[in-house]
Amino acid sequence: MSSRSVFSALMGVYILVFFAYLFGPLVVMGLTAFNTPAYPQVYPFEAFTLDWFATLFADADMMYGLRKSVLIGVLVVLVSVPVGLAGAMMMTQVHARARSFYYLVVVSPVLTPGVIIGISTVVFWRQTTQMTGLKFFYDGTVLTVLAQSSFISAYTMLIFLARLQRFDHTLEEAALDLGASRAQVFRNILIPFMMPAIGSASAIAFLSSFENYNTTTFAILADKTLVTVLAGRLRQGTTPALSALAVTIVAVTVCGAILYEYLKRREAREADRRALNASRAELADLNAVAQDAA
């Protein structure tokens, strides 16, 4: 037995253990969601059932928390994506000597524990409400959106910075020289170029908000989201209905990823087709010119 064969065998065992560790809980969770016992059980598999999904969707607290999590996630996207884009654009405009300090300031929320962000948000807006009488901000949903956006905006900014590094600023200069305003340059040149990053940042912001617990559990006050409801249920003991919820979330995520990949490949095929048609048209024009010259 050679060293190469031993290395290949060890690598195969490592890959097997890695994927078993990664996907094993998902397989167990999926089996318990379709098994009949009231306690999550994989073996013996008594009978196939969909009752736990019906139990899940009939759970008023769970459905309320799900709707609240989706609402907060959408609001966080609407706040964090524009803020992250503005922060990334500001990064490209500040002086080179101040850029490191600016980067440290805007990225610092990512390094701050979520518990600190949640508590500080509640304390700050409670004091602001007492001084100004603006009770709108001292609401569980509003506080959660503000608290989550404070660090999720930094995530989106990093995505936009990576995209802006490939932006050709001579396009802006050419548009300004031709008489376009700053608003027109932003709307017609920069935004179309940033659309892939905007889509990615929106997805990251929504998922980060949807699964966040540390910040949410303090900022939500007396209200509740899906993660806080799940935390309370797990203290009382798990049920197959929770496995059904996990299977549903995984299925929606996988379907979304497949749809995104399909749309991306279709756009790539359309771009290739347009490029091919343009090449054929150019070749036809060259042939016509050559025939006229002959």
Image (spheres, rainbow, N blue to C red):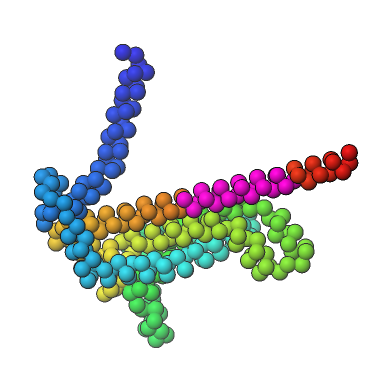
Can residue 3 be seen here? The reply is: yes
Q: Residue at x 81, y 44 (%)?
A: 288
Q: In this view, does 159 lie to the left or right of 12?
A: right
Q: What is the x, y in percent for residue 208?
A: 38, 59
Left or right: 170, with 111 as reference point: right
- Number of labels in the image equals 0
Asked if residue 147 can be seen in this view, the reply is no
Residue sitting nearer the eye, 60 or 146: 60
Q: Is residue 277 magenta?
A: yes
Image position, residue 238 (x, y; %):
16, 57
Q: Quarter of the image for the C terminus: give it.
A: top right
Residue plotted at (43% across, 54% down): 259
161 versus 229 height, above or below: above
Q: Where is residue 260 in the image (x, y as percent from the top left)?
A: 45, 53
Q: Residue furthest bottom?
A: 133
Residue at x-position 25% and y-position 42%:
24
What is the quadrant of the N terminus in the image?
Answer: top left
Residue 52 found in image quarter: bottom left
The segment highlighted magenta reads 262-282
Q: Is the magenta stretch mostly helix, strand or loop?
A: helix
Residue 284, compared with residue 151, is above or below; it is: above
Q: Nearer the viewer, residue 7 or 49?
A: 49
Report if residue 89 lies within the magenta region: no
Q: Which residue lies furthest to the top in this view?
A: 1
Q: Tell me where residue 143 sits by quadrant.
A: bottom left
The residue nearer to you, when weighing 252 against 72, is 252
Left or right of 228? Residue 35 is left
Question: Viewer-proximal residue, 268 or 173?
Answer: 268
Where is residue 67, by image quadrant? bottom left
